[in-house]
Image (cartoon, grey):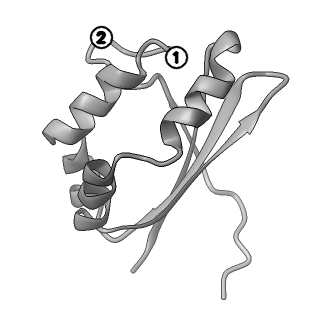
Amino acid sequence: MIIRKAFLMHVNSDMQDEYQRRHNPIWEELERVLRHHGVRTYSIFLHPDSNQLFAYVEFESEVQWERIAETESCKKWWKYMKDVMPTNADDSPVSSELREVFNLGT
């Protein structure tokens, strides 16, 4: 079974280009962690007028997804990104999970 999640984050208004630059390409080490933990697809979209980021991810296991946050690669990434976006005390991005209300699945 594939689990889908969507969530919102924000980027600092003067850091939109830097945010995109840091993701292109994403660190190979972080990509390996995501894949190892069952992430199949992960996309982030920017609404440039509001600085809002919309993230969509598909993965295999809620437990594996939550374990990503415990990895050194993820913690290192959060520290690297904390100057371009609002973050929590543990350096994780401030985010709001969205509830799925419709899906035209195959």
At x 26% / y 38%, what residue is drawn?
Answer: 74
| Viewer-proximal residue among 36 and 17 | 17
Residue 61: quadrant of the picture: bottom left
Q: Quadrant of the N terminus?
A: bottom left
At x 24% / y 62%, what residue is drawn?
Answer: 37
Question: Would residue 70 be seen by someone viewing this image from the given angle?
Answer: no
Q: Nearer the viewer, mark 2 or mark 1?
A: 1
* Left or right for 7, reference 48: left
* Left or right for 86, reference 8: left
The residue tagged 2 is: 89
Residue 16: quadrant of the picture: top right
At x 24% / y 29%, what residue is drawn?
Answer: 76
| Viewer-proximal residue among 100 and 53 | 53
Identify the secondary structure beneath mark 2: loop
- On residue 84, which mark appears? 1
The picture places residue 31, in percent across and down from the top left corner, at 33, 56
* Left or right for 22, reference 63: right
At x 63% / y 17%, what residue is drawn?
Answer: 15
The picture places residue 55, in percent across and down from the top left corner, at 58, 46
Given the image, on which type of amino acid does mark 1 rest? Val
- Are there few (<14), some (14-19), or many (20+) residues within 10 Å of tag 1? some
- On residue 58, which mark appears? none
The picture places residue 10, in percent across and down from the top left corner, at 61, 23
